[in-house]
Amino acid sequence: QSSSASASESLLTMQKNANDWVMPTGTYNNWRYSTLKQIDTSNAKDLQVAWSMSTGTDRGLEGQPIVIGNMMYYQTSYPNYVYAIDLNHTGRIAWKFEPPRDSNAPPVACCDVVNRGPAYGDGMIFVDALDGMVYALDAKTGKVVWKAKNAHPTKGQTMTGAPMVVKDNVIVGVSGGEYGVRGYITAYNVKTGKRVWRAYSEGPNKDMLISASHTINGATGKPVGPHSSLKTWKGNEWKIGGGTTWGWFSYDPKLNLMYYGSGNPGTWNPTQRPGKNRWSMTIFARNPETGAAKWVYQMTPHDGWDYDGVNEMVLVNVDDHGKTVPALVHFDRNGFSYVMNRETGAPIAIHKYDKSVNWATGINPKTHEPIVDPAKMTTANKNVKDICPASQGDKDEQPVSYDPTTKLFYAPLNHLCMSYQAFNVKYKAGFPFVGAIVNMVPGPGGYRGRFIAYDPMTGKATWSIHSMFQDWGGALTTAGGVGFYGTLKGMFRAVDLKTGKILYQFKTPSGIIGNPMTYMHDGKQYVAILSGVGGWAAIGMTNHLHKSSAGLGAVGLNATLTDYTNLGGTLMVFALPSKVASAH
Ligand SMILES: O=C(O)c1cc(C(=O)O)c2c(n1)C(=O)C(=O)c1cc(C(=O)O)[nH]c1-2
Ligand SMILES: [Ca+2]
């Protein structure tokens, strides 16, 4: 890599090498797709465990390893160990980074002390730590090159996300929507760790790096105008307004735009914050060098259900009335799938991907805003019943995968409904600012999760596999026609992407909330996944460890999960037996 090329120019070249998996999402377009095809629909039944490794931790593992050449890197949840594994000597730990721990952090992590993995760029490994530190580590030695303080647990701020390296910046989000944190994303210079820009989700346009005349509101097609956020909040409530940025990032090098979503407005009690609460629950398209917002689109104005808008944006081209359009596809927590023109923010197709969605009857074709059912709007001191989906949404952080062969999206989902009782709550820095009691139950049919093959242009699923619990881990698709995902019970699965037939499954040591990835080493294709139950889906299992969480209502939801699995982290790596692999 020449030193004059930006870190992302190198990554754009590196991501074409299917032997590696160079960033958390596989590639900048977030497809989580690999052209590797040694494992195919005819031999996937022969898969077996090639090697495995204890992570030395016992909390939820929501990330995935990355592989650069002969090295694999992965990160655990709190404590945020980072491991460098030498693939030439199966499982040998080349180095381990153990950051200092800040005991203020775990008590203010809303949904378990998870982490979504390291990123690579310019010879360094970048990681978010729960306590708000960003570290740049020398990829060869694990030595700290620089560090930056990005978030403060005493203010309720934590970090659980995966960074993205783009241009010469490493971009990171922040968590704390359940603690009245005003969300922001921040870019640090890859080489020096100096802050380049920070963009808030609420407040004056200048704080949000929004331009009154140039930033388009995708819903109206018009510039957002001055005070685009301020006038949608009562008084100064935007200062504690949530809109945190704890999801995955994606990047389009041609448009030079990055995409991400903002989370729930604070508090969860909508009566306390009249207005549309912009720009919480919003997709942002930003220039990654300057942070300038090109367009915004709010999925859930004036949220009353905790439908964080942070789920990933998958960049694909779609056929819109005979024209090829650069689009992004987003499965929102609110139960709608969105296909948007990623250049302009204009909606192309919006459908319910779970037919049980009832908080909104549809999307107004003129305003492109949801048509809320007044009977499902929550309000202070009233217990509103039978709302679908529940706060965990029809999909939470678990990332989907796109297969360019079938042109379908493979989505691990939730299927839950709830009752929601909002109440008034006072803000105090570093303390929960939730303001609702939520009771979640399985959706119609009595199951809690499913894995589907789905076309977001038509809103139709080709097939669906039901799960007893939420499918809280991510998906992977491959050119071998095989898809992979894990279940909360701990089943690692290989499925036929065309038919949904389960070709292989293996019960891993714990429940799976991690994301499968694949790589090739010495002529052999491997699929790796982290097994280690946790996250919000399993918070009932960790409540006793998690002393003063935000008290989020997983109450009883997954009480029986302990009949199937246990806490504990393991890296699992699967491959074909040598005979089958070489006969291929
Ligand atoms: O608003 C926030 O800042 C925030 C942060 C996080 C997080 O950092 O994990 C989650 C959520 N919200 C959230 O609403 C949610 O459903 C959730 C699930 C999980 C998980 O890892 O299982 N984290 C989070
Ligand atoms: Ca949230």
Image: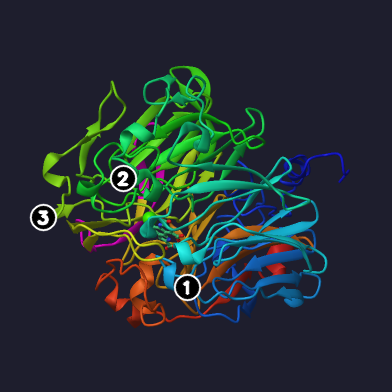
Amino acid type shown at disc 1 = Pro
Q: Residues within 10 Å of mark 3 (few under 14, many from 20)?
A: few
Rendered view: 233 above or below 420: above
Q: CA distance from mark 1 to mark 2?
A: 30 Å
Q: Which residue is mark 3?
A: 382
Any part of residue 356 in sight: no
What residue is rendered at 41% in x and 39% in y? 282
Task: Characterize the magenta stretch by its predominant secondary structure.
Answer: strand
Say which of marks 2 and 3 sits in front.
Answer: 3
Q: Which residue is mark 1?
A: 106
Is residue 539 shown left or right of residue 362?
A: right
Name the quadrant where ligand 1 sits: bottom left
Q: CA distance from mark 1 to mark 3?
A: 31 Å
Name the residue at 29% across, 36% down. Answer: 276
Taking 92 as reference, is 397 above or below it?
above
User: In this orientation, which residue lies closer to the viewer: 71 or 76?
Assistant: 76
Look at 55% across and 59% down and name the residue there.
151
Residue 455 on the magenta segment:
yes
Amino acid type at image mark 2 = Gly
SS at badge 2: loop
Residue 349 can be seen in this image? yes
Mark 1 or 3 closer to N-term? Answer: 1
66 sits to left or right of 176 = right
Amino acid beneath label 3: Lys
How far apart are the two marked residues, 2 and 3, measured between alpha carbons?
A: 23 Å
Say which quadrant the C terminus sits in.
bottom right
- Stretch in magenta: 439-463
Q: Position of residue 196 (x, y in %)?
A: 67, 43
SS class of the residue under badge 3? loop
| Residue matched to label 2 | 335
Q: Are marks 1 and 2 in contact (CB under 8 Å)?
A: no
